[in-house]
Amino acid sequence: MRYLILGLGRQGKGIAEFLLENNEIVYGYDQNEEKGKEFLKYKTFQLVREEDIKKLKNIKDLIVIVSAGINDENPVVKMINNSHSIISDIEFVYSFIKNTVIIAITGTNGKSTTTCLIGEILLRDKKNVFYGGNLTPGKPAIEAVREKKEFNVLEVSSFQLARIKSFKPNIGVLLNINYDHLDWHKSFEDYQRSKMRLFENQTKKDFCVINKNLIFNPYFNVYRPIIKIFSTDDKFSDAYYDKIKKKFFVNFNGYSLPVINMKELKFIGKTHSENILAAILVSKILGVREENLIDGLKNFQGLPHRLELVIENKGIRYINNSMCTNPTAGINSLLIFNQKVILITGGKEKNLPLEDYIKVISKKAKYVILFGENKEKLKEELLKINYQNFLLVESLKEAVVKAKEISKKGDIILFSPAFASFDYFQDFIERGEKFKKFVYEIEKDKN
């Protein structure tokens, strides 16, 4: 076989390395040709440009693997789409690990946290487990092929699911679906269909773990797998969170039993209730011992850039939530705090609905600092509802400086962009690290 890899970023790079180490013939393409030059040391690698791809159309045994960031409207994809079948990296990986136990997690928000939480619980239960996939920082899915574990817990994106052929998890987990990635998908309907593809190849022996809010979704046509439902509202679901008692419960084998109290969790659990419920159900399906489940939940620290406490100094807390890349995540982040916050928000516009986010800002933010590519648009939306406690800045560093100036003892400074990072940063990780760097610098100068 021969392979054409379109996109040599984190996912494509890992697959290229794996194939080349196994002496396969690989053609690599990336808009940034520098990414391909590191593979020139391999005799079976050929770096191709856009004009070269036409010449590959006549290769009959060519497998085309497209990185998640490249959508079907890309000219390079269109060029090869009619002559060859295109798959995602997750489909390629599946061909090697399909005889293992696969737990695949997707959703608009919370999938990285849930993936890591399930992975950590299974490790505590002494299971031979790999966890990774689409999450960053973390191991790409191709590492599951190298590590050869019995259990593989994988975060998968709508981009990857859009190109699956036979990918089938033993347990598929769908956390939620909100407006996002309309710059990649043709429509919100297309985005929802891609998410639901997680279950399309499952059999009656497999499990569909899903948020109750999604079982009436028009694209949820799932009949074959065993369906397990979690909810933050319905106590008759297979797992549920009681908001009054602040406890997580599970209904399993005809019994309703408490699992854990919210106050026992180390990470900020309120915004992760759906993630915790999904992890509980997966653990029950896999027969995790109760003490290991509890231990895993109690000791999970959360992930960097997800409501991460950077520092608390003189009664002022700085929270880094750089992974917040859509307005729905922005809303959820604001709602977990019992007090009004000083909010730093803005980024690359995705053309997503803003009305609900703006309303929650007006209720939950005592002051807003707008930065990023879409700061003017956010300003207009705030003025429409007569909210005027905001200012615009030109850089993230300036945003942190202004937040510090405004703050007083007892305040929370929440960096929760609610939009993509690509206006000024490589990704949300770089954005979050820069925020933390500026916080440390400013607090050091003030002391």
Image (cartoon, rainbow, N blue to C red):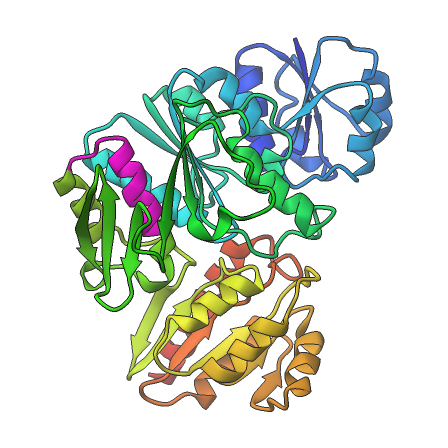
Q: Quadrant of residue 149?
A: top left
Q: Is residue 435 magenta?
A: no
Does residue 54 appear to the left or right of 28 in the view shown?
right
Residue drawn at x 77%, y 25% is 48
Q: Which quarter of the figure is the C terminus placed in?
A: bottom left
Secondary structure predominantly adopted by residues drawn in magenta: helix
**Looking at this view, is 240 or 223 the one in front?**
223
Q: Quadrant of residue 278?
A: top left
The image position of residue 382, as x and y in percent, is: 63, 83
Does residue 235 appear to the left or right of 31 in the view shown?
left
Residue drawn at x 64%, y 51% is 181
Residue numbers of the magenta segment: 275-289
Decide: is 90 above or below 70.
above
Decide: is 92 above or below 386.
above
Residue drawn at x 57%, y 17% is 19
The image position of residue 57, as x and y in percent, is: 83, 17
Q: Is residue 286 magenta?
A: yes
Answer yes or no: is residue 422 visible: yes
